[in-house]
Amino acid sequence: MLPVAYQLPAAVLLVVGGLISCFLGYRLFKFVLGIFGFILGALGASSVFGVSDTTPMVIAAIVGGILGALLLLAAYFVGVALIGAGLGALAANLIWTQIEGDPHPFVVVLFSVAGALLATWLQRYVIILGTAFGGAWTIVVGALAIMGDKTALNAAAAGDVWVAYPMNPAPGQPWVPYAWIVLGLVGTLVQMFITGGQSGRVVKPNKKKKPPPSE
């Protein structure tokens, strides 16, 4: 976990990154990959040091973040599959937390593989859905952390990378999942019809038409 002085800036960065992902994810897909690569890399690298090792932890977070961003950017062509796998894992956790707690690792793997396959088939729509709902959840966690929710605040600066997206960031506040769904749907609609519309699509080059044969 990051020192207390860095927890609020970490939460603000989550909100900013979530906003970009939620509403501009398809148009700025590479940038979004870089943002989340930096977050994951920073969380993973900083977990090596204890809370009292402030300077080494910050340096490790910066270096790990840069490496994480470069890694996801290098994996740009498989980024869609990674998003699908992440959505599959998120779906498995959300379903099982409503049923009987944490899902079995095999179930998470199964959902991740299914999500990756589906993502490669429906590339554009999966990018939009993945970035919209992933960004929406990041906004929710970061916003709750800024408002002082302890669970979300710990998640925003946790040493364990797997709790960056807690399934229940605000116990006792049942409105949170609904806020996430509404925000994700709004982000999806914004990307589908505004930021990720014709101007946001990958346009294939038009083939030059051959001139008609001269008589």
Image (spheres, rainbow, N blue to C red):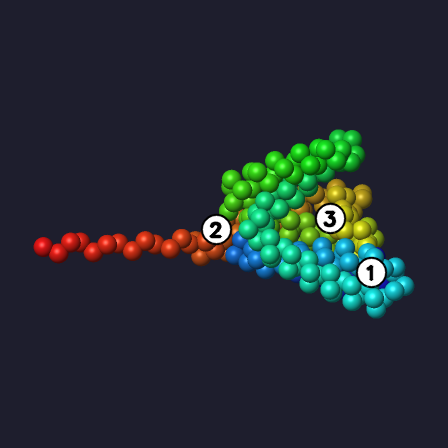
SS class, disc 3: loop
Q: Quadrant of residue 12?
A: bottom right
How far apart are the two marked residues, 3 and 2, measured between alpha carbons? 28 Å
Q: Residue at x 67, y 34 (%)?
A: 110
Residue that badge 1 annotates: 2
Q: Position of residue 85 (x, y in %)?
A: 63, 42
Dot in front, 1 or 2: 1
SS class, disc 1: loop
Residue that badge 2 annotates: 193
| Mark seen at residue 163 | none
Q: Position of residue 56 (x, y in %)?
A: 83, 66
The residue carrying pointer 1 sits among few (fewer than 14), some (14 to 19) or many (20 or more) residues within 10 Å by Cα, namely many
For marks 3 and 1, the one nearer the N-term is 1
Looking at the rendered structure, the kind of residue marked 1 is Leu
For marks 1 and 2, the one nearer the N-term is 1
Number of numbered discs: 3
Q: Which residue appears farthest toward the right when viewing the image?
A: 52
Q: Which residue appears farthest toward the left when viewing the image?
A: 215
Q: Quadrant of residue 28?
A: bottom right
Q: Quadrant of residue 143?
A: bottom right
Which quarter of the rendered picture does the N terminus lie within? bottom right
Residue that badge 3 annotates: 165
Q: Is residue 10 visible?
A: no
- In the image, 100: left or right of 214? right
For marks 3 and 2, the one nearer the N-term is 3
Dot in front, 3 or 2: 3
Q: Which residue appears farthest toward the top when viewing the image?
A: 99
SS class, disc 2: helix
Looking at the rendered structure, the kind of residue marked 2 is Phe
The residue carrying pointer 3 sits among few (fewer than 14), some (14 to 19) or many (20 or more) residues within 10 Å by Cα, namely some
